[in-house]
Amino acid sequence: MSMPITTDAPAAAPAPTSDRRTRALLACGVGPLLFIVVILIEGAFRPGYSALHHWGSELSLSEYGWQQIINFLVAGVMTLAFAVGLRRALAPRGGPGAAAIPLLTGLLGVCLIVQGVFVCDPYVGYPAGSQGTADASFHGWVHGINMFPTFVAYSGVILAAAYCAFRRRDGLPWALFSLIAGIVVPVALYIGITRFNMDTQTGTYHGLWQRISLGTGGLWFALLAARLLRRHDSHPRSTAATG
């Protein structure tokens, strides 16, 4: 008796747990973009606050300051998770970017958490009626100093990705965008710093320039996450490096 012949294709195997975890971790790359979006929304509705002329960190002050503190902490945790996802996604290809990019991203995540834990001191004008801070508190000092490694990591990871992209010829538009973003992030912040006088604790448009810096970096991270997720879906076992 002959056996019936079936032409049914075998059922697709479910995605390995490790692949699903990597995908979830990579999705956390939207964290820096959500961070600046929250700052923009908070700054638009906070009484007495000017998004153009106040630092984003000043949103950590006043009775609503807990919202920005949570924003710092959530963004930091998401960025740390993204760093783990980057390591898992980039490791198969190897090269300098496989180590430097996740490491700098992890440093950025830690710095964001530190900014949330150590709240800045009040400057002149915010919260309403503030005359500034004569002597910096310990948490205000830590917050101020921590800004430098934060933006070193922020621009460093973008420039590292740009270098790898040019080296591996991994898409000229992406390489150029990464290079431009890696320059805009620190330059815009520097312009903002020059617009603020620490002696009088006042300034003009430093908030705008900081938002340009954070917005550029946040957009870059979100696009990097989308880029890696797309590649991970195409090659779940060996996601190519961002370059």
Image: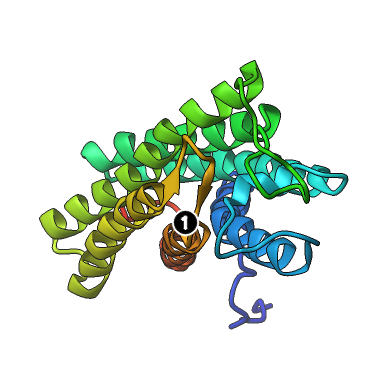
Tell me where residue 124 sits by quadrant: top right
Tell me where residue 53 sits by quadrant: bottom right
The N terminus - image quarter: bottom right
- Disc 1 residue type (three-letter): His
Q: How is the image coloured?
A: rainbow
Expressed as whole percent of the image width and height from the top left, the position of residue 186 reads 32, 50
Q: Residue at x 48, y 66 (%)?
A: 226
Q: Where 242 falls versus 90 (above or below)? A: below
Which residue, given by chain and number where applicable, does mark 1 sit on? 206
Residue 16 in view, yes or no: no
Q: Residue at x 59, y 59 (%)?
A: 36
Along the line of sight, which residue is nearer the eye, 173 or 153?
153
Secondary structure of the residue carrying numbered label 1: helix
44 horizontally vs 26: left or right: right
Q: Where 113 falls versus 56 (above or below)? A: above
Q: Residue at x 23, y 56 (%)?
A: 162
Q: Residues within 10 Å of mark 1 (few under 14, many from 20)?
A: many
Expressed as whole percent of the image width and height from the top left, the position of residue 16 reads 60, 50
Along the line of sight, which residue is nearer the eye, 82 or 69?
69
Expressed as whole percent of the image width and height from the top left, the position of residue 85 reads 51, 44
Q: Residue at x 33, y 47 (%)?
A: 155
Expressed as whole percent of the image width and height from the top left, the position of residue 93 reads 27, 45
225 horizontally vs 25: left or right: left
178 horizontally vs 52: left or right: left
Instruction: Give the tally of numbered discs.
Output: 1
Residue 205 in view, yes or no: yes
Residue farthest top in this picture: 138
The C terminus - image quarter: bottom left
54 horizontally vs 61: left or right: left
